[in-house]
């Protein structure tokens, strides 16, 4: 931008989105939503000494700053359907993501000179095709037109901004959170209920545009539009909306809803939820010969300028309002459906046949919605119900094929590790995802397969199944223009079982030593890579007097010789597996002094602990040799039993 004869010039003219990017899709094609455009300018004036210095733009110069397109001949015309506003309107910038607003924030410029910033706001009409458009900034100084586009060798730099509008995301009735305030108004024979609908997080309604074709009722309220009227054999009922009630704090009186039947200035409770999407059902004496249900469109605008269209409906009795979709009915389909193992594999044997161990499976899906305005399909998220419907079943042409006997598909991971155990290490399934088509808005749904060991162990082939928009899709089907063919093979393996020789024993002979009793705790630690998670206890513990509430006895023994007045019992502690759980003498046995004494119980990091208790009492010798069962971190069951020696004074663990 150099010219020796100039006395005023722009040394910088730059255009970008509000986050500094050169392209964006943060614009809904609804004619109201705006996309903020940041234009940076640096104005310079030449002094009498020929030196250029910075100067501020005049108000007239700032007002001439605008946005145009590269191909515009006079640098002023915008493409059909586009508008450029000098001021921001009431609608939020950015795009709505379910649960939050993904706002576009202005980014700091790295240009060091005293930059002036002018913000302009672009809008696009939804009735036109959605196409990317490249814009440039335009300014006029001293009669000369400048653009940010590089169009001649004299310009030192250039910039442009490409905007791709996206279709507005419209809500359905299932997206709304309903609430009914029964008895919002009562007076004599008149009853009034107020219905509220709250949109998802990140959205709010800013304008209630009312009904397209309300009923012309006699004695209609001064601010009411009726959608349906029901005469019936009882008291007549009408339902409708208050258009233009654009603040949830609006005060409502009876005459706003109906002209007769109750005191005109009587207040109606109308602010129970923070939403302007409210409908009213009034029951009282009204003059109309026959019922009518218009199902006329009810229109509302949200905080992104998108219009949502519903209608009020009712059952034949007119006793309640239901919300129907109108103009929001969309056609959905599954464009991509795939099943894979973590890491992208199709076959695995990483599943123990114990009924508890799980094999992780990933279902990948892309849901699309048809946009009639542009005759295109766009990616949209699955609903919670659709995600919940995703499952795994036997590979078959039958879309309703059940799982084979013994197989289960869980939505959630349980407490057990996935993968297989190798002595000394855990061989886990990889968590990488299989590659998907580029730019695909894919969703990954995890499911977990289990197999019961009571069934014959053999390989099975499985497919994914999901229900969307009332249609069942599987990864083994052809439907219209989509075809899916994907599967996984799972071959369970028999669970392993530990032996006594696999365990590391440690005995704490001083877990508790008081004058009237002695407690020894035996710890058994499994090999590396394994950990006991569930202590199932003894199958058939002894039933003895004064048994502790947290103890199961396997044997009792009076020792040897008539002079020995000590009895000994051995068994396991139940219900004390949580870290930090404390064990008292009273948990083990009830009729011994020092009941509140604590037993040392956490000398090793394992829940497989046996206890020998010696105290003064009179018992006969009993021995159940009952199996003691535990489940490890892969859900595999291990069984042992408690033997004894030295007159019951020592526990000996045996394989069951």
Image: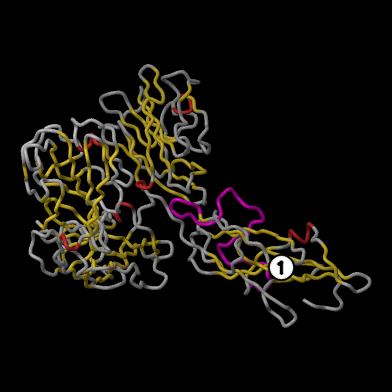
**Residue 78 seen in the current view:** yes
> Where's residue 198, x and y in %?
42, 41
> Where's residue 187, x and y in %?
40, 18
Which residue: 52% across, 43% down?
Answer: 206
Decide if residue 276 is on the left or right side of residue 612.
right
Q: Quadrant of the N terminus?
A: bottom right
**Residue 472 seen in the current view:** no
State whether residue 395 is above or below residue 536: below
Say whether residue 163 is magenta.
no
Image-quadrant location for residue 60: bottom right
State whether residue 591 is above or below residue 614: above
Q: Across the whole image, how many numbered discs are drawn on residues?
A: 1
Tell me where the magenta segment starts and ends, as one range: 72-101
Decide if residue 140 is on the left or right side of residue 560.
right
Toward the right, the furthest residue is 48
To which residue does mark 1 refer? 111
Toward the top, the furthest residue is 188
Toward the bottom, the furthest residue is 153
Q: Quadrant of the C terminus?
A: bottom left
Say whether residue 79 is magenta.
yes
- Foreground of the two, 310 or 546: 546
Classify mark 1: residues with Cα within 10 Å, few (<14), some (14-19) or many (20+).
Answer: few
- Foreground of the two, 9 or 488: 488
- Foreground of the two, 43 or 34: 43
Which residue: 56% across, 68% down?
Answer: 23
Decide if residue 170 is on the left or right side of residue 480.
right
Say which element carries label 1. loop
């Amino acid at each position: 931008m150099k010219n020796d004869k100039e006395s005023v010039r722009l040394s910088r003219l730059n255009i970008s989105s509000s986050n500094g990017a050169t392209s964006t899709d943060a614009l809904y094609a609804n004619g109201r939503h705006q996309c903020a455009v940041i234009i940076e300018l640096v104005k310079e004036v030449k002094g009498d000494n020929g030196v250029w210095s910075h100067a501020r733009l005049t108000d007239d110069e700032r007002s001439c700053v605008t946005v145009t397109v590269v191909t515009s001949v006079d640098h002023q015309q915008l493409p059909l359907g586009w508008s450029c506003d000098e001021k921001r309107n009431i609608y939020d910038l950015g795009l709505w993501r379910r649960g939050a607003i993904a706002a576009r924030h202005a980014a700091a410029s790295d240009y060091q000179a005293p930059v002036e910033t002018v913000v302009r706001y672009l809008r696009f009409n939804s009735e036109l095709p959605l196409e990317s458009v490249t814009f440039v900034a335009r300014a006029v100084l001293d009669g000369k037109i400048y653009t940010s586009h590089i169009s001649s060798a004299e310009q030192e730099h250039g910039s442009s901004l490409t905007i791709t509008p996206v279709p507005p995301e419209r809500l359905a009735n299932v997206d709304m959170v309903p609430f009914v305030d029964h008895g919002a108004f009562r007076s004599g024979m008149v009853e009034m209920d107020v219905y509220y609908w709250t949109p998802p997080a990140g959205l709010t309604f800013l304008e209630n545009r009312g009904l397209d074709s309300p009923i012309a009722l006699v004695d209609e309220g001064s601010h009411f539009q009726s959608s349906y009227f029901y005469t019936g054999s009882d008291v007549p009922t009408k339902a409708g909306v208050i258009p233009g009630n654009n603040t949830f704090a609006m005060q409502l009186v009876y005459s706003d809803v109906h002209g007769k039947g109750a005191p005109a200035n009587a207040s109606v409770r109308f602010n129970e939820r923070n939403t302007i999407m409210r409908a009213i059902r009034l029951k009282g004496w009204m003059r109309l010969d026959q019922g009518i249900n218009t199902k006329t469109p009810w229109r509302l605008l949200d905080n992104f300028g998108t219009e949502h269209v519903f209608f009020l409906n009712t059952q034949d009795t007119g006793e309640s309002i239901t919300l129907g979709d109108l103009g929001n009915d969309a056609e959905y389909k599954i464009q991509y459906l795939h099943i894979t193992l973590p890491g992208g594999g199709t076959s695995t044997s990483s599943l123990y046949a114990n009924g508890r161990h799980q094999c992780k499976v990933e279902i990948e899906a892309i849901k699309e919605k048809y946009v009639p305005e542009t005759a295109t399909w766009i990616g949209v998220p699955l609903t919670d119900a659709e995600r919940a419907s995703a499952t795994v079943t036997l590979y078959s042409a039958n879309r309703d094929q059940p799982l084979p006997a013994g197989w289960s598909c869980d939505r959630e991971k349980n407490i057990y590790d996935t993968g297989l155990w190798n002595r000394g290490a855990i061989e886990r399934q990889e968590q990488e995802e299989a590659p998907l088509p580029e730019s695909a808005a894919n969703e990954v749904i995890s499911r977990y397969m289990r197999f019961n060991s009571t069934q014959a162990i053999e390989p099975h082939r499985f497919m994914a199944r999901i229900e969307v928009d009332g249609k069942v899709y599987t990864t083994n089907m052809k439907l219209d223009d989509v075809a899916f063919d994907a599967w996984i093979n799972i071959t369970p393996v028999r669970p392993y079982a530990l032996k006594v020789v696999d365990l590391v024993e440690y005995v704490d002979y001083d877990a508790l030593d008081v004058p009237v009793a002695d407690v020894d705790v035996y710890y058994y630690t499994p090999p590396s890579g394994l950990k006991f998670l569930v202590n199932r206890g003894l199958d058939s513990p002894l039933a003895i007097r004064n048994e502790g509430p947290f103890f199961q006895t396997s044997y009792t023994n009076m020792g040897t010789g008539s002079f020995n007045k000590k009895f000994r019992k051995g068994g396991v502690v139940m219900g004390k597996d949580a870290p930090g759980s404390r064990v008292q003498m009273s948990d083990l046995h009830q009729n011994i002094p020092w009941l509140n004494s604590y037993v040392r119980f956490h000398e090793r990091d394992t829940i497989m602990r046996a206890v020998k208790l010696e105290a003064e009492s009179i018992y006969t010798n009993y021995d159940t040799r009952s199996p003691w069962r535990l489940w490890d971190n892969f859900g595999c069951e291990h069984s042992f039993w408690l033997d004894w020696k030295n007159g019951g004074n020592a526990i000996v663990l045996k394989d069951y």
